[in-house]
Amino acid sequence: MTQPKPLRADAQRNRDAIVRAAREIFSEEQKEVPFEDVARRAGVGAGTLYRHFPNRDALLAAVFEGEVAALRGRADQLMETLPPGDALGAFLREMVDHMYSQRGLARTLFAASESAGGALSDEGQVLEDAVTGMLSRGIEQGHLRDDVPAGAVMLALHGIAVAAVHSERRQEADGVIELMIDGLRRS
Amino acid sequence: MTQPKPLRADAQRNRDAIVRAAREIFSEEQKEVPFEDVARRAGVGAGTLYRHFPNRDALLAAVFEGEVAALRGRADQLMETLPPGDALGAFLREMVDHMYSQRGLARTLFAASESAGGALSDEGQVLEDAVTGMLSRGIEQGHLRDDVPAGAVMLALHGIAVAAVHSERRQEADGVIELMIDGLRRS
DNA sequence: TTGACAAGCGGAGGGAGTCTCCGTATCTTC
DNA sequence: GAAGATACGGAGACTCCCTCCGCTTGTCAA
């Protein structure tokens, strides 16, 4: 799971610069971005870009990985400081906020996740695990109902995520989070 | 809303052939399809293709339009023959089946709807209207609860649609339809 | 240090796909 | 059936993708 060989210092620097540039550029531009523009912004040549990331999806996956790691960290943090129901609600609300503020990026990633096969799904799984973790903790502790399958929550989550990304639906997303959390609480 | 000028006979024939070819080819190939392959399969030149559909999204929208029209027709039919709760359930199940059997096409359309701005959203709205129509009819007649916003159902619907398209999640989709319909029924 | 080898860099260039342009062909109308 | 309007097709310019390889830079042992 860890990289087999540590990169040379300059290579690591370039790799980081590329990911950073990609994140910026995918956030700004909503249209197809020429792949080489990323290289240009990162200040490297096309060859370097392609050595680090064999194709577009690989680069997107790297960007996505950063997002997921941040979100996952936040989930752990909330789990430690709030009761499970509240933690889940807070997490979803923050997720929506985050996605809304970065919706250019989110759209790009969504689009990629449809076309790219499993390149992004590993990271998606990490996010899913974070949510199911919160859920099952809540069930264990008796705060949340145990008769709603995690799959249903994940499906709703997907709907919510999409809603968050389309600005006209920002309100609906918040509403459904409330509805869902309420529905999940043990009454 | 109707086309301002009726197309010339040959032009209409070509347009239909292109849409048909596009539907076939997008169903078969899961990878990026060279746009001109569509022209070739339809037996027309590139110029003709581009005259009818200025870009990829316009063509996808035309294909999507056909799908939506079929689904919408089916919704009306079910509304006339079943009580609203059953009609909605049946419609969603059929929608899932349809999408699953056409998942190559569905994936392509999903991907396009993320990147393409509003090109496909008009048709998506038509579908949404069909569902909200069923919902509000059910509420009027007292079969369904009136305290669940239509937006929540639409969000879940989106999640379900995505699940239907990813074969590993086919089961979840059916489960959530049951769950949702049960939840909506007036108890 | 310094030398030698490994690792990485960059950008020229071949190939694929996109889209336009315009001379030619086909339809429609009178 | 002739004229004008409409549509066709494919050559070619352009853009973007990605590879290849001669050159540069980092690393490490002596």
Image: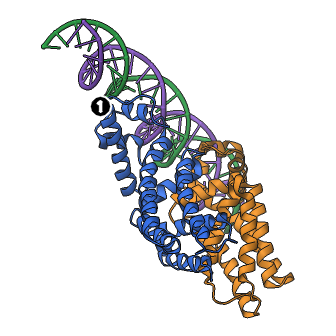
Chain colours: A blue, B orange, C green, D purple
Question: Left or right: C6 with respect to B6?
Answer: left
Q: Looking at the picture, how far across and down is residue A83, in whole percent?
A: 49, 73
Residue at mark 1:
A9
Q: Residue sitting at 44 percent across and 53 percent down?
A: A69
Residue B19 appears in the picture as rendered: no
Three-letter residue code for mark 1: Ala
The image quadrant that residue B163 belongs to is: bottom right
Pick the front one: B131 or A119: A119
Q: Residues within 10 Å of mark 1 (few under 14, many from 20)?
A: few
Q: Where is residue A145 in the image (x, y as percent from the top left)?
A: 64, 74
Q: SS for tag 1?
A: helix
Indicate left or right for C6 with B5 as reference: left
Q: Is residue A93 above or below residue D3?
A: below
* Chain letter for the residue marked with disc 1 in the picture: A
Among all residues in the image, which is located at the extreme front?
A141
Picture quarter containing residue D28?
A: top left
Quadrant in the picture for the N terminus of chain B = bottom right
Tell me which residue sits at (70%, 72%) in the image.
Answer: A147
Residue A116 is at least partly visible in this image: yes
Q: In this view, does C5 lie to the left or right of B186?
A: left
